[in-house]
Image (cartoon, grey):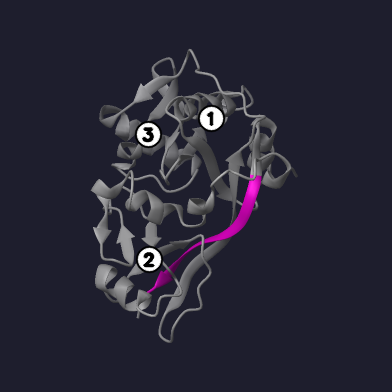
Amino acid sequence: MVTLADTASPATDDSVLDSPAWSALTGAHSHFAIGNDLVLRYPHDVSPFVGVKDWEDPGVWDAILDVFGHDAVVSVSHADPTLPEGWSWAHRIDGVQLTQTPALQTRPDEEAVVLGADDAPEMLALVERNQPGPFLPRTHELGRYVGIRREGRLVAMAGERLHPDGWTEISAVAVDADQRRQGLASRLVLDVAHAIQQRGDRALLHTGAENTGAIAAYEKLGFALRRTLIFGAVRTP
């Protein structure tokens, strides 16, 4: 597996990727932000991701309770905190974060169409069939989403999710089972990455560590492993 150290310039500033939701919610996505000085979240119908300024801050647990209340399930990613008494993990999985390298050769796709609010029901149905990760009724508002239709049916899509400073996450990469092995996912990733680069950002991706096929495909396109991490959720007391 290629690592970022093999390809990236030492001057590349990727520190915001250690807490991308916090960077997004205090920057490009600040208009979505709900919370306080230590913890921010998206509206419930936009995204489950939560931004935490500093997990080592002694007030962070009270700040989470302030935002979510008691007996709530709170998304935790890019961190593996030691939980206080009364808190518990609802679930957790191993994940990976990949970032673009100079090998990534992006291009717009002639068949890709931009998706919006009118397409949201079809986007939700495509996600439900393929389970690429969380996608909610207003997730499409986070950035640019594109898809491919066959005989009028939406069969593949990809788009933008978190926008940490200087970066944009590619997410919701989904292709129906009967349309796979045609390169549709790769084409859409390259289209989304092209638009990201055109506005001066760099592209990143997240996926489960067990999703070795997707990781290999992303590496073939020109992404490289930056870090391993935890995706999960905790239950408040």
Q: Which image quadrant for residue 75?
A: bottom left
Q: Residues within 10 Å of mark 1 (few under 14, many from 20)?
A: many
Residue 143's place in the image compared with 36, above or below, is above
Check disc 2 and report the residue beneath it.
74
Q: Main secondary structure of the magenta part?
A: strand
In-front residue for pair 57/79: 57
Q: Could you tell which of marks 1 and 2 lies nearer the N-terminus? A: 2
Query: Which residue does the image show at 33% across and 37% down from the upper left?
Result: 140
Check disc 1 and report the residue beneath it.
189
Q: CA distance from mark 3 to mark 2?
A: 24 Å
Quadrant placement of the N terminus: top right
Residue type at mark 1 is Val
Residue 85 place in picture, x, y as percent: 43, 87
Q: Which image quadrant for residue 128?
A: top left
Q: Could you tell which of marks 3 and 2 lies nearer the N-terminus? A: 2
Determine if the magenta segment contains residue 124: no
Q: Which residues are magenta?
A: 225-235
Q: Which structural element holds mark 3?
A: helix
Check disc 3 and report the residue beneath it.
123
Q: Total number of numbered labels?
A: 3
